Amino acid sequence: MDNATWGHIKESLAGAVGKSNFSNWIEPLEFAQLQDGVATFHVPTNFMGDWVQRNYADNILGALTKSGADVSRLKFAVSSGAPRQPAAKPTATPPAQAGHDAFGVPGAPLDPRFTFERFVVGKPNELAHAAAKRVAEGGEVTFNPLFLYGGVGLGKTHLMHAIAHELVTQRPDLRVVYLSAEQFMYRFIQALREKQMMDFKQLFRSVDVLMVDDVQFIAGKDSTQEEFFHTFNALVDQHKQIIISADRAPGEIKDLEARIKSRLQSGLVVDLHPTDYELRLGILQQKTEQQRAAHGNVPMADGVLEFLAHRISTNVRVLEGALMRLFAFASLVGKEISLELTQDCLADILREADRKVTIEEIQRKVGEHYNVRLSDLIGPRRVRTIARPRQVAMWLAKKMTSRSLPEIGRRFGGRDHTTVMHGVRKIDELRGTDSQIAEDLELLRRALEA
């Protein structure tokens, strides 16, 4: 077999591995020799050779055998006569076009469902959505990094995938890497163990857009944090876009180095707030259309979606899972999705969602957060260091319990309902102007809902 034959063979691989993966990983391979059943190829870096061996060896062996070559094993070697080059530029590719990973790099596959078109926008997530859309345009970097944070099931990962999908479609020239913090850590440890740190650094510092999901997982991992910090700085210095997500704000991630917190806070930090009723209903309406497409036109009684939007309020994934279960059950038994069927089918989910937060729990958590004694929180003192936490507790009691304003007032030292109303309005005003109050409220809500 010669280079010309290999040229024809490798072209046939494009359809098997996808266009982008082909240009990143198959195109750069140079045929060296075929001896004793071993086909040797020259590669720019050891890292690239290892990656091709793990991910595309079967495809290559199959194509070689089909062409009539007597080959049983592949070998990859860095050419000693050529200068070492950086690894082939990584580019994201939707799974629909790739037979293996969605990326030609050690990243994670994109979920084809997570696009901007399928992201339901409401007041709690409209800023995060707008920021994600701006970054997805792939133009000049205006805020770096973009840091998205929020609780489980609020849409962080959906937006990350949507950005990657959009960038790949609109700007195929960009080198995009999306992966979780755990995958970054795994690849870093692997590179250390196999003495391939130069390849690792070249790969991750040659991208145009780096997207790291769930960055809280590197907290406490000193060596990984060190490498992440240097990668971060190198990309920012080159004006490359970085997009990060976490389950909490940078300042709240325990055991994360102060210099990394500072870097993460230097860009745009956006909170995805817990969903409100209108947003949950909108999500259910969209997902209902998708479920009908999958299960047929299963009839549904009026009020079911509204019931679910009211009762399941903490987690969109749970909400979507409940709807999926409903449609699957109703289609199997051939019944209409009625309120009665909903309550029977989702009894366990509804019981879990019914766990009530009490005013006493709220007062205790707020007191611990602000270091205020319970006796002061419900007592007569009106100094600001006590009055503001008291108003926060009243706001949470109004939002998270079904208690009336007079009942809340009684639990706060026998105060009048107008005092509670004033406190709730004051905190509503401050939420939009005081970022610290907004962060405190979100942190307390998550702690109480946990």
Image (cartoon, rainbow, N blue to C red):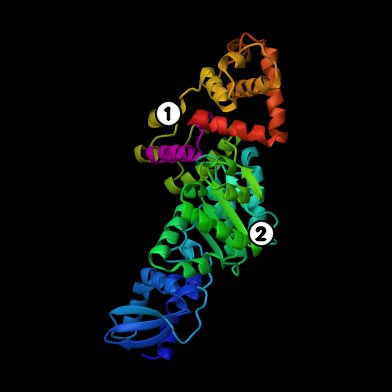
Q: Which residue is pictured at 56% across the width and 68% down the height?
A: 206
Q: Which residue is pictured at 44% across the width and 83% down the height?
A: 79
Any part of residue 165 in sight: no
Tell me: 210 left or right of 131.
Answer: left
Q: How many angstroms separate mark 1 from mark 2 (CA)?
A: 41 Å
Query: Label 2 is placed on what type of residue?
Result: Glu
Q: Which residue is mark 2?
A: 137
From the viewer's side, name the closer residue of 441 and 311: 441
Magenta residues, start to end: 306-329
**Majority secondary structure in the magenta region:** helix
From the viewer's side, name the closer residue of 429 and 153: 429
Q: Which residue is mark 1?
A: 352
Q: Quadrant of residue 428?
A: top right
Local crowd at mark 2 within 10 Å, few (<14), some, or many (≥20)?
Answer: some
Query: Label 1 is placed on what type of residue?
Result: Glu
Q: Position of residue 267 (x, y in %)?
A: 66, 51
From the viewer's side, name the closer residue of 55 and 195: 195
